[in-house]
Amino acid sequence: MIRSKKAQVEVTFNWVYILIAGAVILLFFAGIIVKQKVASEESLDQEVIRIMENIFTAAQVSENTKTTIDISGLRDYTLYFSCEEGVSKYGLSGKSLPVEDSINPIFAPNEIKATQLLTWSVPYKLPFKVIDFLFVTSTTNKYVLWGNNEISAGFIHSVSNVSAANDKSKINFNVVQVQDLAEIQPAQNVQIRIIDGEGRIKEGDPILPLLMERMKNIPDKSLTAVSFQGGGSSRIANFFVKEKEVWKKLNKEPIRIVSLGGDNDAALYGAIFSGDDQIYICNMKKSFTRLGYLNEVYGGEELTAGKEGGKLREMIAYYKNRPELTLTSECLNYITLNPQDNLQTSLQSHQNKVAECLTRFTAKELPPECIGLVDSALKVKTANDNLAERGDCITLY
Amino acid sequence: MRLRNKKGQLHLTETIAVLFIFFVLIVFGLIFYFKYQQYSLKEEQEQLVISNAIRTTSKVLFLPELQCSKGAAEPEDNCIDLMKVRHVAEVFDRHLTDYYYPIFGYSKIVINQIYPEQKEWVIYDHPKPIYANETIIPLESTYFTLTLKDESLGGENIHYSFGYIQVGVYP
């Protein structure tokens, strides 16, 4: 009888032992699985970010190219874009650390939630190519051109003039033109950006009740507007966002569009694609910084002190060392000898303007001094055109 | 009593043997797992270096600091202006930390002319600090053929030569 009890204890002990050991083993493997799951999710986030970085690099360097990127795998995620203190940040909302880019200007809405990403690379020229602006948007970001005006016509022409890197038929910028804001239908669009080319939207203006009714299920930040006034070098932009029932202006001072105009006006379109004033200002600062360095390549470090260097010095040396060339005197006139608006003085003035613009730049405002870059760029352009067309000389760019 | 004791000892030895084998298997499993992880990490690092080299090459090819341009026209494809190249290294060097390092990272960019005569211009070279005392530094390089334009050589005609760009990334 005693032996039977002992045996029972032994059998029970064995089972308890097996259960505990089994549970420990199970927990061990469960722990590994959980850890692996977390690690692979993190690695997936990083992979997505790395791929995005590669896509944006590729899109940016392919000048004047529109690209469609299928991101249906990220349909449950929100991509966010911002730019502060000269650094663009983008990534998956609430996920891994964002990509930071202090060099390339990326103009995008604050948020994108879609299955297709659209990118468009446009060169910014002042007067020579400074950098490629990358516009990023999606099929669910709707751009509403309000009224018949120069900006609406130009933008429609540019977005429909497709030179796609991949499948042409799939390039589909979500752009509509309306005469009245009551025509806007939010439909499935996540964000709506109104482009007012005639400066009609003002701070505190009420939003059309019919539009309010249609937008009642959409958060305030999803209805934004950019309003342009003036033309040429006096064109300014103001950024607005819906705040309850009125338009709230985001920028304190009007933002000047530093551009030489023409087709595919990168600086103008940058404002259209920027989610807010900060994204625009911050990215423009990046391009002015690059302009300063390009001026150094063309004119040398001491250009502002009146001492030529870089490519300009080689151009001058080339003609001075070859007096026998028939074009020498004429070319030297355009480069350096003409008393006014020769290439050297124009480039020097351009570099001075860059320095002036960047010195006064603040994180929140694009200083009015930067508009001086338009005039100085036009002078460089005229001098370069003279070299090319009138003189048949070596050109700066 | 002695028989029971021996039985108990045998049982204990058996349990210890089972546990020993179990832990040996676990250790083998862990070693295999960590070796695999190490290998895949190394492979991933190599992939990153290669992708970095390709990314840097595409950036270099389209740099306005180097590209051949002609007024408002589109830049000439795969063409580099030697009149800019000869001065660009100074600019890259002057603004290395504040601007060009984020573009090129730890890399070496060399433009080589191979025809009509051989020449080379190192326009950027920024090795990792760990290679400071090394004489031979490993480089993961990509190459791309180029047209080199030099207007200062051709008399009244533009002078073109042929070469390639080598973009090496320090691993």
Image (cartoon, helix red, strand yellow):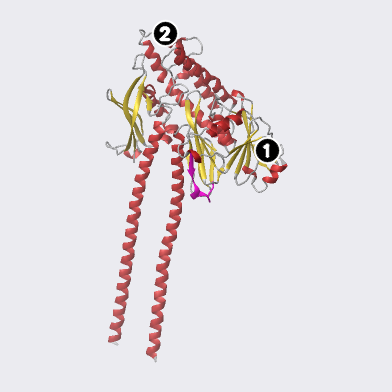
Amino acid type, residue under disc 2 in the picture: Ser
The quadrant of the image that shows the N terminus of chain B is bottom left
Q: Residue at x 66, y 30 (%)?
A: A199
Dividing the picture into quadrants, the one containing residue B115 is top left
Which of the labelled discs sits on residue B167, or is there none?
Answer: none
The answer to whether residue A65 is left or right of residue A190 is left
From the image, tell me which residue sits under label 2.
A329
Q: Is residue A255 left or right of residue A115?
A: right
Chain letter behind tag 1: A
- The image shows residue B90, relative to residue B169, as above or below, that is above
Q: Position of residue A339 (x, y in %)?
A: 50, 9
First-in-chain label (1 vs 2): 1
In this rendering, the answer to whether A70 lies above or below A31 is: above
Coordinates of residue B21 in the picture (x, y in percent):
30, 69
**Residue B51, position as x, y percentages in the image:** 38, 41
Name the residue rendered at 44%, 23% in the picture.
A296
Provide the residue span drawn in magenta.
A67-78
Image quadrant in which you'd find residue A357:
top right
* Residue type, label 1: Leu
Whether residue A73 is in magenta: the answer is: yes
